[in-house]
Structure formats: structure tokens, C-alpha cells
Amino acid sequence: MIERRKTRQISIGSLKIGGDAPISVQSMTKTDTRNIQKTVQQIRRLEEAGCEIVRVAVVDEEAAQAIGEIRRRIRIPLIADIHFHHKLALKAMQAGADALRINPGNIGDRDRLKKIVKEAKDRSTPIRIGVNAGSLEKDLLKRFSGATPEAMVLSALRIIEWMEDLGFSMIKVSLKASDVQRTVGAYRYFSQKSDYPVHLGVTEAGRGAGAIVKSAMGIGILLNEGIGDTLRVSLTGDHKEEVCVGYEILRALKIR
């Protein structure tokens, strides 16, 4: 019997994450978010496959504004994926995004982050801190001589501490690398340091059997150790396969 790590619980839309809530399966659209019709069609296919949370890329203001209409036409919570431009995060929340995913390595200075956190706090919008080994802050790369698990965890912990100082704690964390060992190491270390819920995944898994095995190994090892509150199997190709493989990993471990 797997003893699951005790984490704080947050809500993304009507879905509970962390605590004693079931581990949920997430995916991400492969459409241009500005194309509302195609994006909604893809999300509905994901819903049919059992997807419980969906993430969409917000590349510009038009994409941010599209979130409102997309959200009205789907059933599952919607996360806005933000890179570089803090104003897009603000617009996505104003349009009705259920949560944000931001990368502390590319979102910019703390003044910009502060605006995002203030808006999220006012709207009770959770934020996933998405630390990625490929875009870690330069000072951490220098200090640890690369994107080590320790560097990745410190990136997450210091942004968490800063958000907490602003009175914000509706936080979920991901610590992704493109290789299994670093990914597993980062999540293990973070789980020793914090009780915030975590989203599992291996970056750039790719296509075919190799990609499935890579994700299954990384995610499965962590789940077997009781680590993980949501997951996404990142695959190139049919987005429904991500959801199916995610559930097969959970079934293999007798979790769901």
C-alpha cells in the first residue's frame, strides 16, 4: 500500500488538489488558443478521455481574451500557461482562467511578479510555479554549476517564500527536467522541504514507446514513493494518449 505524502489542499475551479483528494490527470492543448472553436473541440475530446484539468498556451492578448469564451464552453478547470509577459497573466485571470502556470525563470523581475500575485490573491486564483531545468535563473546555474535538483528546488522555495510574504499560499509546484534522474531527484528533495502540492511530469518526453517509458518511469517512481498530486504525461502526437497513459500509470500502481 502506497503511503501518500501529506500536502496542503488547494482548489482549481471545483477540483480539489492535494490533501486526500485523488491524484488528477492533466493535459495541454496543442491548438492555437486564439482559435476558440478548435481549442474547445480538442478540450472536449480530452474530457471524453477522462482529462480532469487542461492547460492552454497564452501567447498574446488575443489568446488571453479567448480564455473567457473557452472556459464557458468546457466542463473542466482551465489553466493559463504564461511565459515572459506578466500582463498576459493579468489578462488571463481577468478573462476567467481557473489557475495560472508561471515559470520564475522567465517571467521577469519581482515587480512584475508582484502584480500577478496581487491579482491572483484578489481573485483566489491558484498559481503553479513551474520550475524547468532548461530555463533556470542564471544565478542558480552559476551557484550550483548547472541545473541540478538542488538548484531547481531552491528556485521554487525562494519564490514560494516571497509569495508567502505577500500573503499568498494557493500554490502548486512542478520541477521538470528532460531526464528521469534529475526530475525524480528534484521532486524528492522538494518533498522533504515543503508540503505544497506538486504536479508531476517529465519535460520533452517526445513520441512513441520511448517517450511513454520515460514518463512512466519518472512519474511512476515518484507516485510509488507517495509523491504527486496531479500529473501530465507530455507526449508528441495525439493529446488523448497523454490522458490514457496517465491513467494506466495510476492503475498499474493501484492508485486509481
Image (cartoon, rainbow, N blue to C red):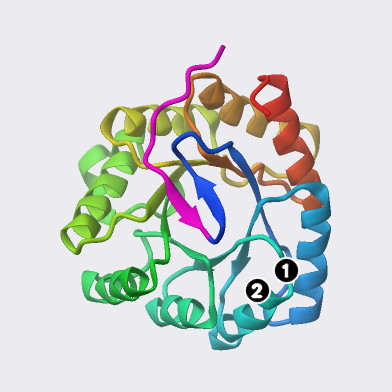
Say which mark, if any, is on residue 71.
2
| Dot 1: element | loop
Instruction: Give the position of the N terminus as an image quadrant.
Output: top right
Q: CA distance from mark 2 to mark 1?
A: 6 Å
Where 148 sits versus 9, above or below? above
**Neighbours of disc 2 within 10 Å: few (<14), some (14-19), many (20+):** some
Helix, strand or loop: magenta stretch: loop
Q: Position of residue 64 (x, y in %)?
A: 56, 81
Q: Is residue 5 magenta?
A: yes
Q: Residue at x 39, y 27 (%)?
A: 188
Q: Residue at x 26, y 54 (%)?
A: 159
Instruction: Give the position of the C terminus as an image quadrant.
Output: top right
Q: Position of residue 75 (x, y in %)?
A: 71, 64
Q: Left or right of 215: which side holds 4?
A: left
Q: Quadrant of residue 33?
A: bottom right
| Dot 2: element | helix
Query: Is residue 237 at all visible to an observer of this figure?
Result: no
Q: Nearer the viewer, residue 53 or 204?
A: 53
Where 79 sits versus 161, above or below? below
Q: Residue at x 57, y 29 (%)?
A: 218
- Residues in magenta, as a range: 1-12
Q: Position of residue 81 (x, y in %)?
A: 53, 66
Q: Residue at x 72, y 50 (%)?
A: 51
Mark 1 is on which residue type? Ile
Q: Left or right of 204: which side holds 19?
A: left
Q: Left or right of 146: which side holds 227?
A: right
Determine whether label 2 and label 1 are within 8 Å by CB. yes
Q: Is residue 76 magenta?
A: no
**Residue, disc 1:** 74
Q: Quadrant of residue 167?
A: bottom left
